[in-house]
Amino acid sequence: MGTLYLVRHGQASFGAANYDQLSPLGLQQAQRLGAHWQAHGRRFGAVYTGTLARHAQTLAGIQETLGQALTPAQQLPGWDEYDGRALVQAIHPGPLTGVTGAERFQQYFRLLCDALAQWMAGTIS
């Protein structure tokens, strides 16, 4: 019987111009997972990913230390993440104003948490 491993992508680049990139820590996380699996002799018969850049970058980081070429058998758009901007705009349609820098990211994150809670409760779609 086979084993299914579900892996979330490594840390993305929150606050960067392009969020859909692994941060240096995210790449290190992927490489460490590959090294762990390599040390335990794990081999994989099939790989499925979402379509985001950070998914491909996580897979590439795992491959660097795993010692096994892994080609996605299929990319599944349904595995991509929710649209955070659309959720925030559903509860806060205008631009974020009055704050900059770290405060702006904190305000966005608070709005995102609120929007996610409302989305999961079915209050917004």
Image: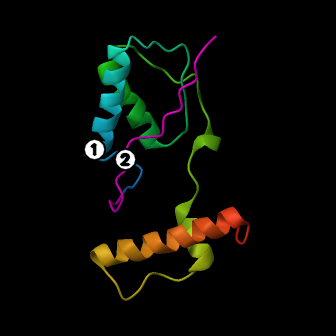
**Which quarter of the image is occupied by the C terminus?**
bottom right
Residue 120 drawn above or below residue 33: below
- The amino acid type, in three-letter code, at marker 2 is Gln
Residue 113 appears left or right of 120: left
Residue 42 at x, y = what percent? Answer: 43, 14
Q: Which residue shows up at 35% across the image and 45% down it?
A: 22
As drawn, the label of residue 93 is: none
Q: Quadrant of the N terminus?
A: top right
Say what secondary structure mark 1 lies in. Answer: helix
- Whether 86 is drawn above or below 27: the answer is below
Q: Position of residue 59 (x, y in %)?
A: 42, 30
- Residue at image position (31%, 30%) is 31
Quadrant position of residue 65: top left
For the record, the magenta segment spans: 1-17
- Residue 112 point in image, percent of width and height: 51, 68
Residue nearer the viewer, 110 or 84: 110
Labelled pair 1, 2 in contact (Cβ < 8 Å)? yes
Identity of the amino acid at label 1? Leu
* Residue under pointer 1: 25
Disc 1/disc 2 C-alpha distance (Å): 6 Å
Dot 1 or dot 2: first in sequence order is 2
| Residue at the (34%, 23%) spot, across then down | 36
Check disc 2 and report the residue beneath it: 11
Give the residue drawn at x 53%, y 83%. Answer: 94
Is residue 41 in the magenta section? no
Q: How is the image coloured?
A: rainbow
Residue 9, x across and y down, in percent: 44, 40
- The image quadrant that residue 15 belongs to is bottom left
